[in-house]
Image (spheres, grey):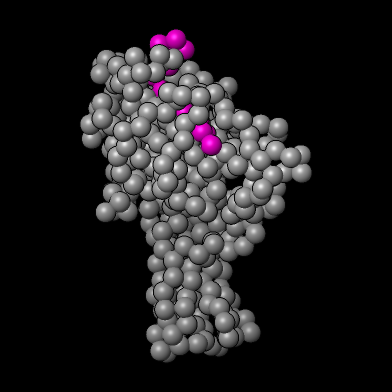
């Protein structure tokens, strides 16, 4: 159910982006024939025929072929610092033939392989390029990280971020927009996200916000009486990490693992009519705002560039055609990719040599 919702959110996003009239980035159709893995030591025992290797996000990575050992477990893996990460698996037939398909919803060029383990180990790798369905504007360098002591804040990219939505004030529209925005975060970072249901919690009401077991991120709507800082800042949304722990990434570099994060949006502003309930409109929209606050939750600070979603001032998502678009820009995407699956899997550590075991939680970022 939740997975299906997520897929439909991603489809909606793809459809939405296509409707935007984005220039078509032609996926190399030449790859459609696939190519055979090089014949190695066990070459005559097996082969892999890859499906298209230049694909739009949302298209699965596919391969067919034969492995040397019948009934072997066949895995589709992507290379990360620190090891290969499995994103699909199947079992070969008695004769060793297989057909495998897996979703690699992660922008960029990635090393992908088919592999089996145990006796007669078999491996064939290729490069898969995952394209976004729109051409991002802006400069890839225009991003800034949330940091403490020179270390970034980031979710563990190998764990699914399970999020809940408190849409008590606004109803299902709020949930749907949040799902579409989270699907964009997932494509940019390669981190799996999963909507796990509704919540009635509001973050930032007390010094420390803590989520119940089974939740990694809270997305909520609250009114200006509940969150006075909407008025005093002023801002229509806040977001950021709310719990952290010392960790090492796949290259054994120190990082502040964001173990929980939150974002909250202004219910009064939602009903003000000043912001459209969409990702594309003639006036500023909630799509941009959600992407911005989720960017903070995933470890981005404000960008100085006005053509980035993470620009400090809201409502700057206007394109030359006069429309506002809730789409991550080049700098946002580069920053999110840095805080994504390319870091490899995190390993939590008791504390760093400096004695610190967690970073201060940043003040809620507007
Ligand atoms: Zn901000």
Residue at horizontal 38 percent and vertical 48 percent from the top: 194
Quarter location, residue 120: bottom right
> Does residue 160 appear left or right of residue 255 in this picture?
left
Task: Residue 341 in the image: state x and y as whole percent.
Answer: 55, 51
Seen in the picture, residue 49 relative to 304 is either above or below; the reply is: below
Quarter of the rendering containing residue 29: bottom left
* In the image, farthest residue toward the left: 171
Q: Relative to 27, say whether 360 is above or below.
A: above
Percent position of residue 149, x then y: 71, 32
The residue lying toward the viewer, choosing from 303 and 170, is 170
* Quarter that holds the N terminus: bottom left
Q: Is residue 126 found left or right of 213 in the rendered image?
A: right
Q: Position of residue 85 (x, y in %)?
A: 54, 62
In this rendering, the answer to whether 201 lies above or below 283 is below
- At x 47%, y 31%, the residue is 209
Q: Nearer the viewer, residue 328 or 179?
A: 179
Q: Which residues are magenta?
A: 231-243
Viewer-nearest residue: 62 or 38: 62
């Amino acid at each position: 159910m939740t997975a299906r919702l997520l897929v439909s959110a991603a489809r909606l996003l793809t459809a939405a982006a296509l409707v935007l009239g984005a220039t078509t980035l032609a996926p190399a159709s030449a790859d459609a024939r696939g190519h055979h893995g090089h014949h190695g030591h066990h070459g005559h025992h097996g082969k892999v025929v890859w499906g298209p290797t230049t694909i739009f996000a949302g298209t699965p990575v596919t391969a067919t072929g034969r492995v040397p050992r019948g009934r072997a477990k066949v895995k589709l893996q992507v290379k990360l610092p620190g090891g290969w990460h499995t994103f699909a698996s199947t079992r070969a037939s008695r004769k060793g033939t297989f057909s495998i398909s897996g979703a690699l919803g992660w922008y960029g060029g990635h090393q992908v392989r088919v592999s089996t383990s145990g006796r007669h180990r078999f491996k064939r790798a290729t490069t898969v390029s995952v394209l976004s369905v729109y051409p991002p504007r802006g400069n890839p360098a225009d991003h800034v990280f949330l940091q403490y002591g020179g270390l970034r804040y980031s979710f563990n990219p190998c764990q699914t971020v399970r999020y809940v939505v408190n849409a008590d004030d606004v109803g299902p529209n709020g949930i749907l927009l949040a799902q579409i925005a989270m699907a964009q975060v997932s494509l940019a970072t390669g981190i799996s996200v999963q909507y796990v249901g509704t919540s009635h919690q509001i973050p930032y009401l007390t010094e420390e916000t803590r989520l119940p077991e089974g939740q990694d991120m809270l997305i909520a709507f609250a009114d200006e009486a509940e969150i006075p800082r909407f008025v005093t800042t002023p801002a229509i949304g806040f977001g950021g990490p709310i719990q952290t722990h010392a960790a090492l990434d796949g290259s054994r570099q120190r990082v502040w693992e964001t173990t929980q994060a939150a974002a909250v949006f202004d219910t009064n502003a939602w009903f003000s009519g000043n912001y459209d309930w969409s990702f594309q409109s003639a006036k500023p929209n909630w799509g941009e705002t959600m992407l911005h606050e989720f960017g903070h939750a995933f470890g981005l600070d404000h960008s100085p560039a006005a053509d980035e979603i993470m620009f400090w001032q809201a409502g700057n998502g206007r394109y030359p055609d006069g429309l506002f678009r809730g789409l991550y820009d080049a700098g946002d995407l580069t920053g999110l990719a840095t805080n994504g699956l390319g870091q490899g899997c995190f390993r939590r550590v008791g504390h760093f040599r400096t004695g610190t075991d967690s970073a201060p939680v940043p003040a809620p970022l507007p």
